[in-house]
């Protein structure tokens, strides 16, 4: 479930997870709880729980932004979470007869033209 908090469209919606990935996520969460890294209500992929260089109990936007800045510097090219969205949309639409409406739903776009703007043509 993607929540209203942080949503530009002020909506929440369900994102399906393939069964194989669901099993991996459940396994990861159970292991992290067993070794007492996270509690049931904690963020699952919270860097502050795994590396004491990071302050706080929850991962902040600044920590995520800092990661992408360091990654961009390391790769000598800009890398952003938004770039990953564009790449994912393009990959999802790259097959024969792609389901653009499903991509629109997964990305939470209210307008199909927004979704089409995410998809880059394969020239």
Image: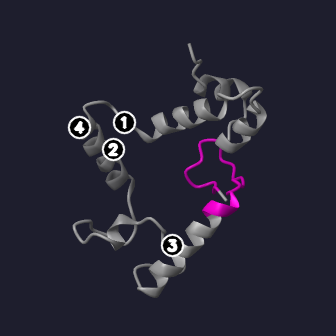
Callout 3: SS: helix
Compute the Cα span from label 3 to label 4. Answer: 30 Å
Compute the Cα span from label 2 to label 4. Answer: 8 Å
CB contact under 8 Å: marks 2 and 4: no
Q: Which residue is mark 1?
A: 79
Q: Quadrant of the C terminus?
A: top right
Q: Which residues are magenta?
A: 2-21
From the viewer's perspective, tell me whether residue 100 is left or right of residue 62. right
Q: Main secondary structure of the magenta part?
A: loop
Q: Which residue is mark 3?
A: 28
Q: Nearer the viewer, residue 64 or 95?
A: 95
Q: Position of residue 70 (x, y in %)?
A: 25, 44
Q: Which residue is mark 2?
A: 68
Q: Which residue is mark 4?
A: 73
Q: Nearer the viewer, mark 3 or mark 2?
A: 3
Compute the Cα span from label 4 to label 1. Answer: 9 Å
């Amino acid at each position: 479930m993607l929540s209203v908090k942080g949503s530009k469209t002020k909506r929440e919606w369900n994102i399906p997870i393939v069964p194989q990935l669901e099993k991996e996520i459940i396994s990861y969460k159970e292991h992290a709880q067993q070794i007492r890294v996270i509690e049931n209500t904690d963020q699952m992929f919270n860097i502050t729980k795994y590396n004491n260089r990071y302050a706080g109990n929850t991962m902040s936007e600044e920590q995520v932004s800092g990661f992408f800045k360091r990654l961009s510097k390391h790769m000598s090219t800009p890398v952003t979470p938004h770039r990953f969205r564009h790449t994912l949309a393009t990959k999802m639409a790259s097959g024969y007869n792609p389901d653009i409406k499903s991509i629109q739903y997964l990305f939470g776009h209210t307008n199909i033209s927004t979704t089409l703007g995410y998809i880059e043509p394969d020239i």
